Image (cartoon, rainbow, N blue to C red):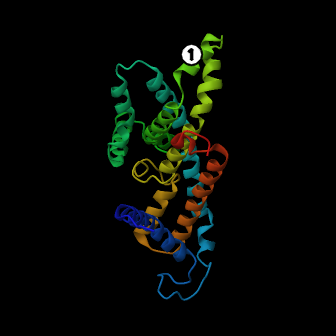
């Protein structure tokens, strides 16, 4: 059996990338189930003593608020991003690049700049009382739209316009054509975009930094505030809880919605 240098290099790079992603998570998981404040090697044993502090309202309430904001922003991003993707795919070519660039522009700007701009706008309007969960949802929508725009756009590449035209020729209305032909083909891209928007919103720090209040801290902001004054493996427990939750959502969605269809162009 011959080994090709390119194949060996590609395998080595893949292993390095997977290690880069997995090793920090392994360290976090290990920190959450060991008895010492600072993990040591060799390990001194296993313990769940830190989990009693993690599963308390101090952390569960910010986690629930983050989930609510992420769900709201993901839902709004799906509606706006899907409509924009359909308009770009089926609309006239004139101005398409300009509109697509405008909708994707939040990915090009530092999120801290967007957050400061929103705060300045609220100050100019003398409406600082708006700062809170509602404003967070609106702001997080701006960074969720580009993900939905891209995934739904990829899904629409698999929809032949001739199918829609044939349905219209057979007497179907524009809405019925969209609901029975286009929307089912967009579904996987919409769910994938919603998932990306949810994860980005749930873990966001920069956009949330200046837009939260004392009574409405999201989980990332609460973690950041806690780390400023002390360290505890409780932080690792909270991180593991949020990661496991996101992985469960992703697994269930992948199982029942076939998220990879928008990549492979067919049922997995």
Depicted 46 relative to depicted 146: above or below? below
Depicted 89 relative to depicted 257: above or below? above
Which residue corresponds to the image point at 58% horizontal and 77% vertical from the top-left? 33
Question: Can residue 73 be seen here?
Answer: no
181 or 237, nearer to the observer: 181
254 on left or right of 90: right
87 or 52, nearer to the observer: 87
x and y, in percent, of residue 124 in the image:
34, 35
Which residue corresponds to the image point at 50% horizontal and 26% vertical from the top-left? 86
Residue of label 1: 165
237 or 226, nearer to the observer: 237
x and y, in percent, of residue 3 in the image:
40, 67
Question: Can residue 109 be seen here?
Answer: yes
Q: Quadrant of the N terminus?
A: bottom left
Mark 1: few/some/many CA within 10 Å (<14, 14-19, 20+): few
Which residue corresponds to the image point at 55% horizontal and 74% vertical from the top-left? 32
Which residue corresponds to the image point at 61% horizontal and 49% vertical from the top-left? 254
């Amino acid at each position: 059996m011959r080994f090709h240098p390119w194949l060996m290099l590609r395998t080595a790079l893949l292993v390095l990338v997977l290690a880069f992603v997995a090793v920090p998570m392994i360290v976090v998981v290990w920190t959450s189930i060991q008895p010492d404040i600072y993990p040591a090697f060799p390990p001194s044993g296993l313990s769940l003593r830190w989990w009693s502090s993690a599963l308390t309202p101090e952390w569960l309430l910010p986690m629930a608020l983050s989930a609510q904001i992420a769900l709201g922003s993901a839902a709004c991003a799906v509606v706006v991003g899907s409509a924009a993707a359909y308009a770009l795919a089926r609309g006239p070519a004139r101005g398409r690049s300009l509109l697509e660039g405008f909708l994707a522009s939040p990915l090009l700007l530092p999120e801290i700049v967007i957050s400061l701009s929103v705060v300045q706008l609220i100050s100019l309007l003398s409406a600082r009382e708006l700062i809170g969960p509602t404003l967070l949802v609106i702001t997080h929508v701006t960074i969720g739209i580009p993900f939905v725009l891209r995934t739904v756009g990829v899904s629409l590449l698999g929809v032949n316009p001739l199918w829609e035209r044939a349905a219209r020729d057979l007497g179907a209305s524009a809405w019925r054509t969209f609901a029975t032909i286009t929307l089912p083909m967009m579904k996987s891209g919409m769910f994938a975009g919603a998932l990306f928007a949810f994860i980005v919103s749930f873990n966001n720090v920069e956009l949330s930094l200046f837009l939260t209040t004392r009574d409405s801290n999201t989980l990332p902001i609460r973690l950041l505030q806690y780390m400023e004054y002390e360290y505890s493996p409780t932080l690792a427990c909270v991180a593991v809880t949020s990661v496991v939750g996101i992985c469960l959502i992703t697994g269930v969605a992948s199982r029942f919605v076939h998220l990879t269809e928008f990549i492979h162009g067919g049922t997995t």
